[in-house]
Amino acid sequence: MTSTDVAQPKRGRESAADMIRSLGLVGVVIAATLIFVPGLFHPSKSQQFPALDYSDYVSGFHQETGRTALTPRPLPSGWKGSAATLTGPAAVEHLHIGFATPGRQYAGLEESVANVTAFAPTVLGARGSAVTGTVTIAGASWQTRTSSRGEYSLSRTMRGVAVVITGSATDAQLQLLAGSLH
């Protein structure tokens, strides 16, 4: 029997140039991905989420409570419905409609047949139970509050429906939403 010598790999001889070539190849793959994958960072209008039709939730609120929910008419330009829920027993039914606003902000419209004083803290947190002032919007007086997140919020009762408006949208956008409710 004869023994055969097996060549051992040469370790430790990799050079900095080899590393740079490897990293360069990875960089080329990443650059190609960023260039050729459309909408990866900035989706086009067709790739963004469609507007949510919240009319069934509004109808459900009326069926459960006998009260007509307030909705923005017309919806401010550039806004679209993005979320909606309807929860609770009829005595404290809670309708939530969320809107994506221009500038990638969010405005939430919360409605209930519960008393606004009791309802506001359920939406805004404990900090939202305190009224911080009032503002007149479209001839109607609204209470201002601050949510537990530190967000500007509006509240009032309209036609037996407690309304709370809050979100990351600007104060002006939230007031625009309040003024468009019918």
Image (spheres, grey):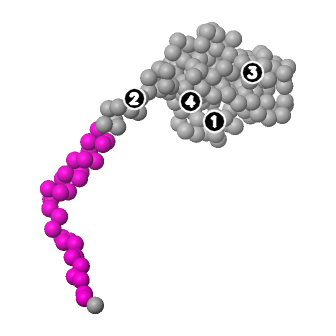
| Residue receiving disc 4 | 167
Q: Which residue lies furthest to the bottom in this view?
A: 1
| Residue 49 at x, y percent in the picture | 55, 26
* Mark before the other along the chain sequence, 4 or 1: 1
Q: Check disc 1 and report its element: helix, strand or loop.
A: helix
Q: Quadrant of residue 143?
A: top right
Q: Can you identify the residue that label 3 sits on?
A: 56
Name the N-terminal-most of marks 1 and 2: 2
Kindly report the distance in space between the C-alpha atoms of the residues bearing marks 2 and 3: 35 Å
Residue 132, placed above or below residue 79: below
Q: Is residue 13 magenta?
A: yes
Residue type beneath disc 2: Pro
**Residue 124 got which mark?**
1
For the record, the magenta segment spans 2-31
Q: Is residue 36 shown left or right of residue 139? A: left
Residue 153 position, x and y percent, is: 58, 28
The C terminus is located in which quarter?
top right
